[in-house]
Image: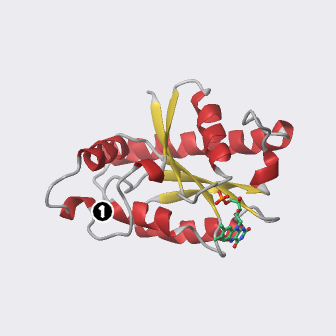
Amino acid sequence: MELYFPVLYGTVREGRRSLVLARYVVQRLSKRPGVRAKLFDPAELPFGNLVQREWELPTPDPRVSAFVGEMASADGFVVVTPEYNYGIPGTLKNLLDSLFDEWNRKPFGVVTAGGIVGGVRAADQLRQVIAGVRAVMIPAHVPVPFVGKAFDDSGAPRNPEELDPRLDRMFDELEWYARALSAARQATPSP
Ligand SMILES: Cc1cc2nc3c(=O)[nH]c(=O)nc-3n(C[C@H](O)[C@H](O)[C@H](O)COP(=O)(O)O)c2cc1C
C-alpha cells in the first residue's frame, strides 16, 4: 500500500529560513519507495487566526475543502517548524486547530529548527497539541540547529552524513506507525 504523508510547514514569517529544511524533508521523504509526500505551506492556505473551524464555516472555501480532503486521505504527517520563543508559531497552532477528525489516530513525525538545541521545546509543545487532536507524535524527532547555516544556496544540506540518517530513522518509524495505525483504524472503530 502506498503511504501518503503531507508535510505541514509551521510559519509564514517573511524571510523564513526554515523553508529550505521543509523542502528538503519533502524531497527526501518522496524518494522512499511506496511513499508520497507533499508540502503544505500555510502562506498558501486560508487559515489565519482561528475564527471558525473548517466544519463551522458557512460557505466552504474550495481551498479549505481541498486541504481537508488531502488531510483525510493521509496516512500520517510530518510537521516542519521553527521554534519561536520556546514554543510553536501561532500559525501552526491555528492550522492544527482548524481541523480535527482528519488528524485523529494518525502518526505525526516532527522536524524542528532553532538555535543550538534545534527547537526541542517546540517539539515538546507539539507533543501536547498532537495529543489534543487525538493523534500520536512518534518517538523519533529531528531537531536541526542553526538552520540558516545548515543548507547551501542550492538547498542541499551542508552536512548530509549527519542529517540524512536522522531523517531516515524518523521516516522508518513514521512508516511503521502509519501502517500499524492504519490497520488498527480499519480493524477497530475509534473509541
Ligand atoms: C519570533 C522568533 C522567536 C524565536 N525564538 C526562538 C527560540 O525560542 N528558540 C530557538 O532556538 N530559536 C528561536 N528563534 C530562531 C528561529 O528558530 C530561527 O530564526 C530559525 O531561522 C528558524 O526560523 P525561521 O524559519 O522563521 O527563520 C526565533 C525566531 C523568531 C523569528
Q: Residue furthest top?
A: 33
Asked which quadrant contains residue 190, the reply is: bottom left
Could you tell me which quadrant the N terminus lies in?
top left
User: Is 159 displayed left or right of 86 in the figure?
Assistant: right
Could you tell me which quadrant the C terminus lies in?
bottom left
Q: Residue 25 location, x and y as percent?
A: 63, 40
User: Is 95 displayed left or right of 32 in the figure?
Assistant: left
The residue that mark 1 highlights is 191
Of helix, strand and loop, which one carries label 1? loop
> Above or below — where is 56 with respect to 39?
below
The coloring applied to the image is secondary structure
Q: Amino acid at mark 1?
A: Pro
> Above or below — where is 111 with respect to 86?
above
Q: Residue 48 location, x and y as percent?
A: 38, 63
Q: Nearer the viewer, residue 183 or 124?
A: 124
* Residue ID at (48%, 40%): 5
User: Is 166 displayed left or right of 8 in the figure?
Assistant: right
Q: Is residue 17 visible?
A: yes
Question: Dot 1, how many residues are within 10 Å of its Cα: few (below 14), some (14-19), or many (20+)?
Answer: few
> Above or below — where is 156 with respect to 118?
above
Q: Residue 163 location, x and y as percent?
A: 78, 43
Q: Nearer the viewer, residue 72 or 7?
A: 7
Q: Is residue 134 visible?
A: no
**Total numbered labels:** 1
Q: Residue 64 location, x and y as percent?
A: 29, 50
Q: Nearer the viewer, residue 50 or 76?
A: 50
